[in-house]
Structures are given as C-alpha cells and as structure tokens.
Amino acid sequence: MRRLTNFSTGRLATELAGFLTDRGHRVTLLLGEQATWTGERRASSVKTFTTTDNLRGQLQALAADSWQAVFHAAAVSDFSFGKVWQRSRNGQLSEISAGKISTRHGALLAELVPTRKLIAELRGWYGRACLVGWKYEVDGGRPQVLEAAVRQIIESRTDACIANGPAYGAGFGLVSPDGTCENLTNEEALFRGLEKRASEAAR
C-alpha cells in the first residue's frame, strides 16, 4: 500500500463545473488524481490534486484571484498515517521505524491521525466568496445530518452546506446557517440552487 485515500469518482464536481461553465461562469475545477469519472470536463480550467496538503496549497494559491464562490465538494482524506506498530506474542506494542517496512514483520498496526479540516481554512483565504461545504453521511438519520451540517457552517464560517448520503435520504439538502433546509430532488436542482445561492451572496 502506498497511500490511504477516500474513494471518489469526481463525477458530481465535474458535472457541476460543466453546468456552471455552460451558464457562462468562469470555473476552475480541482479534481483528485484518482477520480474515476471519465465524462467530459467542460470547466474553464482543470487542475489535478494529489493529497490533502496538495489541494490546500492549490486552493491557497488560487485565492490570489477574485472568486464569487467556492464549492468544496472534494472527498479529501480524513486521516493520514501516523506511527506503525508491531504486536509481540505477549501483546506488547513496539514502534517500527524504517524507510520501507518489510513484510517479514507480519501483521502490523497503523495509527490513523486526523487531518486538518481544509474547509475551516477557506474563509481566511476567500473572505468575500460564497463558501459551500458538503456533508455526506452514512450513519444516523436526516436530523443528525442536518445538525452536523449546521455545525460545519458555524465552525468553518461557510454560507451553506449540502447534506446528502444514505443518512440524509433521497436528494440533496441545501442547509442554511439558521438550520433551514431546502430539499433539492436531483442534481440539476442542486446545481441551480448552488448557482442561485452564489448569485444572491454576490449582491
């Protein structure tokens, strides 16, 4: 194994970028290098990122320009690797330190260290832009997802959050800071809702 990463097709972001481009907006699409979606990329500019830190650097560099909105839909890695441990026969753990760990060590335990929340840094870089994050949740129900979405908005100082995933149910929820949620039934409705929210914020 060479890298720990989330699975992401990149389809939703690519199609959102295409929709906004067709509507006359200048769009830069930042797409993970392992995205599997092979559809047409119609953004004004397409840039590939590798790790969360690489995406952070690209977003920070792009902030030098003026942007109306930033839609942070990337499924970036929530964890990075920490230390690696080997368990002895009596159950004690000893740290393994090597440039390349041999399989002769047998089964190992890897420490997962939470990565810094990239979305929490966006307001510092894009002070006047409309910022929208995502909350894709698998566990729980819609009330828990909406609560998590509002918490993200407050903690990250964003303008809205898109809630979706099995825990949310069908469609997408466009969640506002006050907790109100506009249910958008499909992706076209989502794209139009995001365009409208960004336009309203720019007034």
Image: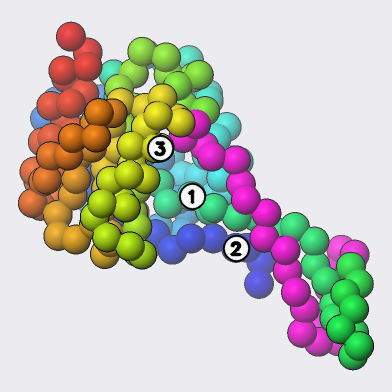
Residue at left offset 24%, top offset 55%: 142
- Please say if the residues under marks 1 and 3 sit with CB atoms less than 8 Å apart: no
Q: Percent x, y for residue 24?
A: 14, 25
Name the residue carrying label 1: 76
Tell me which amino acid carries mark 2: Leu
- In this rendering, is residue 183 above or below 23? below
Residue at left offset 46%, top offset 44%: 48
Q: Nearer the viewer, residue 152 or 128?
A: 152
- Disc 1 is placed on an element classified as loop
- In this rendering, is residue 15 above or below 71? below
Tell me which amino acid carries mark 3: Gln
Q: In this picture, which residue range is highlighted in magenta?
A: 97-120
Where on the picture, by quarter, is residue 162?
Answer: top left
Q: Nearer the viewer, residue 120 or 20?
A: 120
For disc 1, the neighbor class at 10 Å (few under 14, some 14 to 19, many from 20) is many
Dot in front, 3 or 2: 3
Distance CA(mark 1)–CA(mark 3) = 15 Å
Name the residue carrying label 3: 152
Residue at left offset 39%, top offset 59%: 8
- Disc 2 is placed on an element classified as loop
Q: N-terminal of the two: label 3 or label 2?
A: 2
